[in-house]
Amino acid sequence: MMRSWKINFYTLQAQSVIYLSRQLELQHLQMLGAFIICLIASIIGYEHYHQI
């Protein structure tokens, strides 16, 4: 249950980012995208590390 909730949450976040990307300039979008990718990767890596 918790896993599917997280997937729904990430999908919602991705949709909001896509919406924001249409409002922002390309340069700001690239910075925002890079930040979010690093953030999500760190969260997934943190959870994976604690599951071992």
Image (cartoon, rainbow, N blue to C red):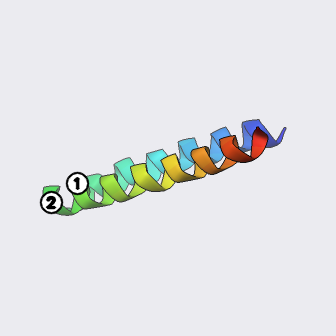
Percent of width and height locating residue 35: 37, 59
The label shown at residue 42 is: none
Percent of width and height locating residue 11: 55, 41
Amino acid of disc 1:
Gln
47 or 6, which is in the foreground? 47
Q: CA distance from mark 1 to mark 2?
A: 5 Å
16 or 34, which is in the foreground? 34
Q: Total label count?
A: 2
Q: Is residue 16 left or right of residue 49?
A: left
Percent of width and height locating residue 42: 53, 52
Q: Secondary structure at mark 2?
A: helix
The label shown at residue 27 is: 2
Q: Is residue 35 left or right of residue 41?
A: left
Task: Mark 1: give few (<14), some (14-19) or many (20+) Cα within 10 Å.
Answer: few
Residue plotted at (15% across, 55% down): 26
Is label 1 in contact with label 2 (beta carbons under 8 Å)?
A: yes
Q: Which corner quadrant of the image does residue 52 belong to? A: top right
Read off the residue under disc 1.
30
Residue plotted at (41% across, 49% down): 37
Q: Is residue 32 above or below residue 13?
A: below
Q: Secondary structure at mark 1?
A: helix
Q: Is residue 36 left or right of residue 23?
A: right
Amino acid of disc 2:
Gln
Task: Mark 2: give few (<14), some (14-19) or many (20+) Cα within 10 Å.
Answer: few
39 or 22, which is in the foreground? 39
